[in-house]
Structures are given as C-alpha cells and as structure tokens.
Amino acid sequence: MNFEIESRAGAYAVTVERGGLGALGRLIAALRRGAPSGLLLLSDDNVEPLHGAAARRALGELAARAGTIRIAPGEAAKTVATLECVCRRLAAAGLDRRALLVALGGGVVSDLAGCAAAVYQRGIDWIAVPTSLLAQVDAAIGGKTGVDLPEGKNLVGAFHPPRAVLIDPDLLATLPAAEWQNGLAEVIKYAVLGAPDLFQQLAAADLERLRGDAERTRALVERCAALKGAICSADERDQGARLALNLGHTFGHALEAATGYVAFSHGAAVAVGLVAEADLAARLGLAQPALAKEIAALCARYGLPVRAPGVDVQRVRSFLAADKKRVGAAVRFTLPLRLGEVRVVEVEQVDAVTAALEGLARA
C-alpha cells in the first residue's frame, strides 16, 4: 500500500509493505538527486540490536558512509538534553544541509529524529522507519515532532514532515506484548473517532490473535495509517480536522506529565484519557454514559488501564492548565459523542473536569 500526505513542504509518500525494510536504500535513491552528503541512523538501545544490521544492509552502498546514534529507550529519553546530544552528534559527523537522518524505532525515536532534523542547521531531511505499532499507526505519520519538558508533554517541537515513511509490519514480530498494548490504545482511538466497524472488529478479537496474524496486522496498520494520513493532508498544522486526533490525549498527556513520564506509557495514558474524556462528554450532556463503559471494556480487553488509581488529581489539573491546546482559561478537549463522531470542545466547566479527573483516580 502506498499513499501520499500533503504538506506545505510538498507531498511525501507513506509505504506499508511487509518486508519493506529491505527497500530502504532504493527508497532513499528514489527520493534524492544523488546520494545524501551524509547519513545517520537514529535508533535506541532496544531496537538497534534487533533491526540495525538489517537496516544497514538495506542501505546498500550508502551503508559505508552511514553512522549510528543510539539513545536510551522510553519516554524518559525524549528530552531537550537528548535532543542536544543528537544534534551534537550530527555536528560531530560533519553533516550539512544535504544530509539525511533515518529514524529507526518507535514513537520516541520518530519524535526526536524529526525534531533534530527540524532544528539542525535550520532543517535537514529525515525518513521515518517505525518499528512499533504505536509509531506505525500514529507517531511516525504527520510531521509533528517534539520533546517533553518537566512542565508538559511535547512543549518543544516543530512541524517538520519526513521525506518518506517506510512501514514494515513484519518488524512488529519482535515487539513485546506490552508494546502491542501501547500501540493498540492509538488503534482504539481511531476506531472511536472515525471507524466504528474497526471498533467492532477489535471487540471480536484479542491481543494474541492480532499478534499471531501477520496479514491481519498489516491490514490494521494500513487502515490506521491511511486514516491519519487523510486527516493530516486536510489539516497539517492542527487548525481543524487534525484536532480530532487529540482524542484521549488531553487527559492522557496531563497524566503522563503529572507522573513524571514513567508511571504510564503513552498508550496506557491515552487509554485512561479515552475513558475519562468519554466520561467528561457524558457529564457535559454530549454523550450517553454507556459510551465510556463501552470504550473502557474494549481497552480492558487488550490489557490497557482505564483508570489511574490514587493519582494526584490537583497535579493532573495543573498540567491540564499548561496544555498547549488550551484557549485562555478553557481547556480544549476532543470529546467522543458516539462511536464514529467526535467534537472539539473548549471546556470551562471546572466542576465537570474535576469530576472526570476524580473518576479516573478512583480504584
């Protein structure tokens, strides 16, 4: 499967192909006039030992000039300090504006690579080769890049689309069950916001069936990647349609930040956020209470949390107040109205938000 995403920098291709990693060198050759002046592969300590050698083989003749940067895995590494380290490695390698950065890894690697490519020498090219379910269906697509601050999630970053996204679903064969769960939170998000049939398919399946069926996995990745691609083509800079993709993320990001980016994986926080935002929609009279229960049941089916027992509600509230999507005193949420329909709402009702937060904090 191939499709293009429109951006201000020009359209870029997304390829979903089993075994597609082997085409990395050909993809780079097809994208550029002549070889890049320099090339670095950015990965992490979990992914590079698994897929780094295959990626370098796929680079062909380019491999002789390709260096590798490895970062620590996990959200805790997505910091300004790590961004500085990556940029200094680019500088130490003597890379100029005709160089290329290849992101081989999950969402953290994609976010960091894109951010480094955006700011190093005011912008160099990069390619995303996502290796996690979360990155293949979401993080590597759309050109949003960034790193976290102690004050909030993704507060430093840029819109800097990749030159291409190469998705090889076969790379998910090495993914631990916990990382499958992490990615499935984003899949459930897509099902709620625009694919009720996918919601029902997920309700009829389970984690092991999905992990064990390579063709079903490919179809799942294709469906979600294409859905995100269409939304991003319509609204690259989060001014309209793309705001729908924030479903589950306003509460979710605040929960991640409030717990130091270590207590909850991104997917786990999004799952809790999906349920809490459906609960908030019901409290505001926008949805039926049964919707939150239905979403919670599906998340629980895949081993995802639906609450954050004992979390400091006031601390989560403080991070909501610092959310980059806020509008004055209002917090902007994307709330589900029913399966397949969401609405962007600027919420000033403090009592309703507090009640939803207290609900997610209950055991």
Image: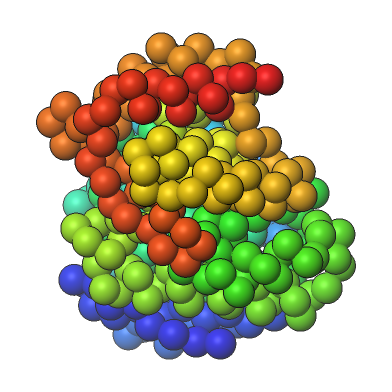
Residue 63 on image: x %, y %: 58, 68
165 relative position to 209: left or right: left
Depth check: give the residue in front, 317 or 103: 317
Residue that protrudes farthest toward the left in the picture: 328
**Residue 229 versus residue 183 in the image, above or below:** below
Residue 136 visible somewhere in the drawing: no
Task: Name the side, left or right, on which 215 lies relative to 37.
Answer: right
Q: Position of residue 61 (x, y in %)?
A: 57, 77
Kindly identify the residue that appears in the image at 46 percent across and 15 percent down.
313
Q: Residue at x 83, y 73 (%)?
A: 213
Look at 16% across and 27% down and name the residue there.
329
The location of residue 348, given as percent across then percent down, is 22, 30
User: Left of 216 or right of it: where is 109?
Assistant: left
Closest to the observer, 346 or 60: 346
Residue under the image location 65 percent in, 55 percent down: 184
Q: Which quadrant of the rendered structure holds the N terminus?
A: bottom right
